Amino acid sequence: MDFAALIPWIGFLGIVGIMLAIDLGFNREAHVVSRKESLIWTAVWISVALLFCAGVFWRMGNEAGLQWFTGYVVEKSLAIDNVFVFLLIFSAFAVPQVYQHRLLFWGIIGALMLRAILIAFAGVLITRFHWSIYVFGAFLIITGIKFLREGDETPSLEDNRLVRTVRRFFPVTEGYEGDRFFVIRNGVKYMTPLFLVLVLIGTSDLIFAVDSIPAIYAITSDPFIVFTSNVMAVLGLRAMFFLIAGFLHGLKYLKPGLAAILTFVGAKMVLVDVYKVPSLVSLGVIVSILAIAIVASMIYNRRAMVASPAPQHV
């Protein structure tokens, strides 16, 4: 490959690097991401993606531009599944909201590196690790049912099965140590539960990528289009997570809705070789479940207000 062929790749990686540096600069301190902030960053990432798509149309032609846009839309819609798995992971580990931004930033950086490897060796890796889709799908179904049965209980790190398993091989702190992944106590290096969550985020995205990357290879075999559309879709995932989580926060029936979504996503993965659910149908099911959860929560809140009117001051 000559240098001229490398210029688009270098230019794209430069754009991604600059955007990540800006993002990290604006969000250096750990903080709870507001709905306004997540909305702004969602708009920023989508705008950057559309500008890059316009560049593909200009430099590579209409066919390549249409392929890039189609791939981006497919990966973006499939990424909705990731958002709800992230919600599950944060809920299972009771991750404080103030640390979630840092986790997703580094988790998505790791996910991008793993996706780059997966795209480069797509044929071999997808064939070899295709079985992981069934395992992960079954895990989501079981977890979704368990999530529903737990009700409103706050999960305990001490009872977390993954934490207890890792402690057999590596010392893990009893709770979170600020936003640090490792701490040193009496000369001994301890892992914090935050690092375990980071690994889970990267791993879950990689398993979803095993399912989603073949979808875009069905649209185009151009590695540049596959890689750049994938990266652009994933880069906006963190902002989309906080946008969705912000709108859903405090809903009475969010947990049953989330359990239903996780069960659906798991079933979709388990049955992938029997029937592949179209991405638009999947998106429609998720939106429908969310709509039911939101409407039911609004009705519950309204009835609760009627049953307990605000006290009147004399």
Image (tube, rainbow, N blue to C red):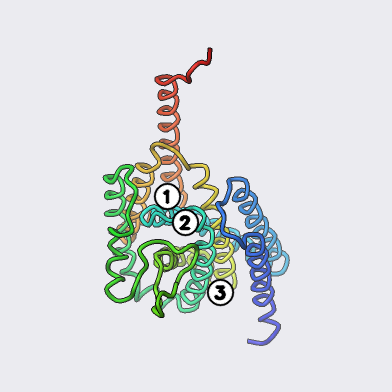
Element type where label 1 sits in the image: helix
Separation of marks 3 and 2 at Cα, in angstroms: 19 Å
Question: Which labelled disc corresponds to residue 151?
Answer: none
Separation of marks 2 and 1 at Cα, in angstroms: 8 Å
Query: Is 84 displayed left or right of 18 in the figure?
Result: left
Q: Counting residues from the N terminus, which is met first, the one under dot 2 or under dot 1?
A: 2
| Residue density around tag 1, few if under 14, some if 14–19, many if 20 or more, within 10 Å | many
Please say if 274 is above or below 259.
below
Who's the residue at 50% across and 58% down the image?
99
Question: Which labelled disc corresponds to residue 78?
Answer: 2
Question: Which labelled disc corresponds to residue 223?
Answer: 3
Who's the residue at 60% across and 59% down the image?
69
Please say if 96 is above or below 299.
below
Query: Looking at the picture, which amino acid does disc 3 mark?
Result: Pro
Asked whether the viewer can see residue 207, the reply is no
Residue 54 in the image: x percent, y percent?
70, 61
Residue 71 in the image: x percent, y percent?
55, 61
Residue 75 in the image: x percent, y percent?
51, 59
Dot 2 and dot 1 residues touching (CB under 8 Å): yes
Query: Is 60 displayed left or right of 262 in the figure?
Result: right
